[in-house]
Structure formats: structure tokens, C-alpha cells
Image (cartoon, grey):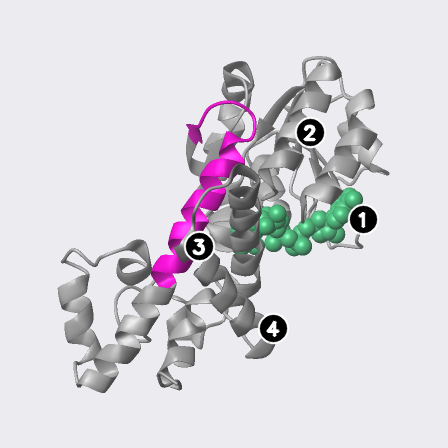
Amino acid sequence: MKVGFIGLGNMGKPMALNLLAAGHQVKGFDTAAINAEGIPIATSATDAASEIDILITMLPNGTILQAVAEMVLPVMPKDAVLLDCSTVDVDSARLVASISEANNIIPLDAPVSGGVGGAMAGTLTFMVGGPKIGFEKATPLFKIMGQKAVLCGPSGNGQAAKICNNMILGATMIVTCEAFAMADKLGLERQSMFDVVSTSSGYSWSMNAYCPAPGIGPSAPSDNNYTPGFDSELMVKDLRLSQHAAEMIDADTPMGKLALELYEQFVFEENGKGRDFSAMLPRFEKRSRS
Ligand code: NAD
């Protein structure tokens, strides 16, 4: 397929490289000066979007996505797919979908889970909103860039799935970390705690697959001095998106709200920026109730 790829950052570049390696014709574009590592670079966003079957965007936020979409949609071939893999607010995703349809372009919002490691390994999970025909057209690319793609319903539902998932993740990681710090004070060995919880009703992805305690469970950022992995700042972004959506639709999300407050405090007041989101554990180790 002929693929345009706008946004060749930490995630976009390895995704584009995997498509290129699989034999697709890729034209990339980024406003920053990047080392493209062999990805053919277009002269502009509109150049990247012309004469393609699918345009993929992997951008920082909804405002930038909207600006890029408004620029490129008029030059995209009729019935091409605009596949946005960025994490953005549900409203931006739905707005971009409606402008796309007005330009006879098939919109898909398809945020990902799996981080930079998943992007490099081609093992991302795509949560997709939009028309089934677009999903079918994009499926060969999902199979190269990821291990799973789930069609979650109409436009915006991919972003809805992503923010619900990450709200669960943020809250679960916090409670896993506070439980480890409490276990320390109770004199319970971390390995014993892991052995019990990972096979009991308190288990979760945060405990079993991404254990915040160094040296326990499978290899994770905690074993590498909490080098991200998934940066705490990105968790703040996703929790903010979840709380923005909750306000828009009047959903009661007390755990999500508190998770956001704690991650904001960690990132902006406690040097959590640039640390993995599981570094909540050393944070709790240092604290008392007061
Ligand atoms: P990044 O900042 O590394 O990459 C974004 C790229 O977009 C940058 O290279 C930037 O120069 C480029 N860009 C910005 N404005 C542009 C424009 N107008 N035209 C063209 N290029 C432009 O970010 P990332 O880590 O690659 O994340 C991208 C998206 O994926 C974000 O929405 C993020 O929330 C999401 N995400 C990231 C991760 C992760 O672990 N990094 C995991 C899941 C989802």
C-alpha cells in the first residue's frame, strides 16, 4: 500500500519503519528535524498526504491533529483512510472524523497500547473507532504494527477505550504501589506479597506483568531504575483526557480523579517527570500518613 505517515517521533518512527520493512511504500513527514533512518521524507504534510491509500498520523494532541487534518484532508485521494493513532480527546477524534467524511475520507481513530517497545517490536494493540470498511482496509497495516486490533464502534470509541483502559491502569498502579509500601511496614517480604497477590484476587497487569518492585516478577522499568517504559507525564496526559471526558458526559469517576491528582503531584511537585509511572512505589516508600 501507499502510506503517508505524519509524526515520526518516539512512536511514529518505529511504526513507519516496520511498514517500510514489510514492503509498503511509505512517505513520512515531521515538523522537527529527525533522523529518518531510511524512511523517505516528504516535503510537507500535504505532500505526505497526496497519492496515498492510507495516511497515518501519530501526533502529540488533539489541537495539532485537528490542524494537520484540516491541512491534509483536501489533498487526500477520495476514499483514502485517515488513520489517527495518536492519543487525543474524544471530541477532537469525533470532529476530525466528521471533517474527514465531509471530504470523502474514511476516518479511523486508533490509539495504541504497548509503548515505544511495542512500536519497535510491532506488538501494539490498536483500539479502533470508525467505519468497518476503514477497519478492513487498515487491517493489513495493523497486523504489521501490532498484535491485536479491536473495532470498538463508531468514531471516537477507540479514544474512549484508550482513556478507560488507562484510567484503570493509573489507579491500579497507584494502589499496587501503596500496597507494596504498606507491606514493607508490616514486615511482609515483597516476594511473598508478589507470590500471593499475583495469583489471588488482587492481581492485575500492574502487579503481574509490570511489577513496580525491583527484582520481583518479570523484567520491568522498576528493574532499570524506573527509566520509562511509560513516562509518568504521559500518564498525566491520559488521566487528564479521562477526566475531561468524564466532565463532558457527567460521569462520576472518583478513583480516576484521585489518580490524576496523585500523578500531577508526582510529576510537577515531586520530580516524577522523566520517570516511569511505576516509580510511585519509591514515592510511597518515603511517605507516612500525615
Ligand atoms: P513524540 O513527541 O515523540 O512524537 C510526536 C511527533 O509529532 C514529534 O516528532 C513532533 O515533531 C511531531 N509533530 C508535532 N506537530 C507536528 C505537525 N504539525 N506536523 C508534523 N509533525 C508534527 O510523541 P510519541 O511518544 O511518539 O507519542 C505520539 C502519540 O502517541 C501521542 O499522542 C502519545 O500520547 C501517544 N502514545 C505514546 C506512547 C509512548 O509510550 N510514547 C504510548 C502510547 C500512546
- Quarter occupied by residue 7: top right
* Label 3 beta carbon within 8 A of ligand 1: no
Q: State the extent of the magenta-drawn residues as a range.
A: 150-173
Residue 268's tag is: 4
Examine the rendered structure and indicate whether residue 255 appears above or below residue 26.
below
The three-letter amino acid code for the residue at tag 3 is Gly
Question: Do the residues under discs 2 and 4 have CB atoms within 8 angstroms?
Answer: no
Majority secondary structure of magenta residues: helix
Left or right placement of residue 195 versus residue 3 in this view: left
In the picture provided, is 153 more to the left or to the right than 12? left
Q: CA distance from mark 4 to mark 3?
A: 18 Å
- Going 32% across and 73% down the picture, which residue do you hit? 178
In the rendered image, is residue 122 in sight? no
Q: Which mark is residue 96?
A: 2
Q: Amino acid at mark 2?
A: Val
Instruction: First in sequence, mark 1 or 4: give its number.
Output: 1
Tag 3 or tag 4, which sits nearer the N-term?
A: 3
27 sits to left or right of 138: right
Between label 2 and label 1, give the one nearer the viewer: 2
Q: Residue at x 55, y 79 (%)?
A: 270
Residue 256, labelled with which disc?
3
> Element type at marker 2?
helix
The CA distance from mark 1 to mark 4 is: 27 Å
Among all residues in the image, which is located at the extreme right? 43
174 drawn magenta: no
Say which of 127 and 76 sits in front: 127
Relative to residue 173, is residue 101 depicted above or below?
above
Q: Which mark is residue 31?
A: 1
Q: Is residue 136 above or below residue 146?
A: above
